[in-house]
Image (cartoon, helix red, strand yellow):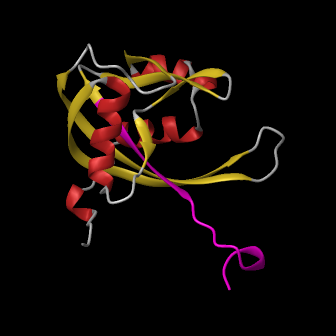
């Protein structure tokens, strides 16, 4: 028997990219739960999609940037509590380092995205009260600390 009373449970699987150009991070400013927050380009893994495909797709959809994934930064597990402090959703996030290749400035961004913006790490850290989750700064911290693994570490088995 699995989770409580026989119910099946699984976390939300998400991807995020840490995209850096000229010392600045590509971030999205988005509306979430009535707030304007900062996040990496990020989103959910879709059926029949690899983690790498999801990271490239989400970055393009949320920022208009085509990117080349260069490394795996880390996997993060987090439980987001409900506003009343009760239970909540569980997330398993895979973060990648990426280099920007080409921008489509005319591209319509995903719903909820206000804009894509380049911020220095200091500017992002100064806005910590506006991070969508603690995963935002953790992935940046790990990236800045040099945490990188080869993409071949992640394998999709057909």
Instruction: Give the magenta range.
Output: 1-19
- Can you see residue 119? no
Q: Nearer the viewer, residue 134 or 1?
A: 1
Residue sitting at x 65%, y 52%: 89
Residue sitting at x 72%, y 79%: 6
Tell me: residue 137, above or below residue 23.
Answer: below
Residue sitting at x 35%, y 38%: 58
Q: Nearer the viewer, residue 155 or 137?
A: 155
Q: Viewed as shown, does residue 156 lie left or right of 94?
A: left
Tell me: residue 144, above or below residue 91.
Answer: above
Residue sitting at x 64%, y 72%: 8
Q: Viewed as shown, does residue 151 lie left or right of 147?
A: left
Q: Hey, which residue is sitting farthest top in the picture?
A: 106
Residue 144, picture quadrant:
top left
Residue 123: horizontal and vertical position, in percent? 46, 16
Tell me: residue 134, above or below residue 122.
Answer: below
- Can you see residue 149? yes
Q: Hey, which residue is sitting farthest bottom in the picture?
A: 1
The quarter of the rendered structure image containing the C terminus is bottom left
Give the total number of marks visible in the rendering: 0
Q: Viewed as shown, does residue 27 lie left or right of 146?
A: right
- Residue 132 included in the magenta stretch of the image: no
The quarter of the rendered structure image containing the N terminus is bottom right
Q: Hey, which residue is sitting farthest left in the picture?
A: 101
Residue 105: horizontal and vertical position, in percent? 25, 14
Residue 18: horizontal and vertical position, in percent? 34, 36
């Amino acid at each position: 028997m699995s989770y409580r009373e026989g119910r099946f449970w699984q976390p939300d699987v998400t991807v995020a990219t840490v995209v850096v150009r000229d010392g600045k991070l590509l971030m999205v400013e988005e509306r979430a739960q009535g707030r304007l927050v900062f996040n990496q380009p990020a989103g959910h893994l879709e059926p029949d999609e690899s983690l790498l495909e999801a990271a490239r797709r989400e970055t393009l959809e949320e920022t208009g940037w085509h990117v080349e994934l260069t490394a795996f930064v880390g996997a993060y597990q987090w439980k987001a509590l409900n506003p009343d402090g009760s239970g909540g959703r569980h997330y398993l996030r895979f973060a990648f380092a990426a280099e920007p290749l080409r921008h489509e400035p005319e591209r319509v961004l995903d719903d909820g995205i206000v804009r894509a913006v380049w911020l220095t790490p200091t500017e992002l850290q100064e806005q910590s009260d506006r991070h969508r989750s603690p995963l935002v700064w953790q992935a940046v911290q790990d990236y800045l600390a040099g945490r990188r693994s080869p993409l071949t570490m992640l394998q999709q088995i057909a």
